[in-house]
Amino acid sequence: MPMQIAVYPGTFDPITNGHTDLIERAAKRFDTVIVAIHSSGSKAPAFSWEERVALAREVLAGHQNVVVEGFEGLLVDFARRHHAGVILRGLRAVSDFEYEFQLASMNRQLAPEIETLFMTPDEHYAYVSSSLVREIAGLGGDVTPFVHEKVVAALKQRLR
């Protein structure tokens, strides 16, 4: 049986407990999960690409079959280079579905051999997003229930 590799793409600015929940659950179902952090040239992230990759590596250290890599360009090209047969996407709410459906449809046109799999986070994290975490932290709020302690420290350092 061929090795099953899944790619979980995003900007992860920063990685949240919702992301980690999906990654840990996916790691039980796939031989390898590649957390693919996009350079996100069209967005203005709070953390640099290198910082986002480093934070994700710290948060996910100890997960034997999880790899964190940065990438640029098309996701399907990245997935092909890594022989991934699955793209994982997280759905928090119905409002995510339309955009995610559009992405999945486009990726299927570009790479019909790669399947998109949608996962929902644990209900404790269904409302957590990186942008909300950044906003709460920026306003001096406590984000410890939503992100790993390494991310809390990085946010405090960034917002000083």
Image (spheres, helix red, strand yellow):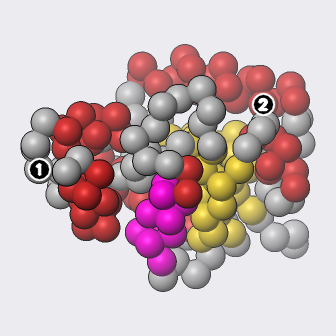
Q: Amino acid at mark 1?
A: Asp
Q: Quadrant of residue 101?
A: top right
| 120 up-or-down from 19: above or below | above
* Magenta stretch holds residue 55: yes
Picture coordinates of residue 132, whole percent (x, y) = 27, 35
The residue positioned 31% from the left and 60% from the top of the image is: 154
- Per the rendered image, the range of residues in magenta is 51-61
Q: Residues within 10 Å of mark 2 (few under 14, many from 20)?
A: some
The residue positioned 46% from the left and 38% from the top of the image is: 45
Q: Is 101 on the left-hand or right-hand side of 119?
A: right
Q: Which residue is mark 2?
A: 107
* Magenta stretch holds residue 43: no
The residue positioned 10% from the left and 43% from the top of the image is: 140
Q: Quadrant of residue 20?
A: bottom left
Q: Residues within 10 Å of mark 1 (few under 14, many from 20)?
A: few
Helix, strand or loop for disc 1:
loop
> Which one is nearer the viewer's eye here, 147 or 90?
147
Q: Which mark is residue 142?
A: 1
Helix, strand or loop for disc 2:
helix
| 102 up-or-down from 37: above or below | above
| 75 up-or-down from 5: above or below | above
Q: Nearer the viewer, mark 2 or mark 1?
A: 1
Q: Amino acid at mark 2?
A: Asn
| Number of marks present in the image shown | 2
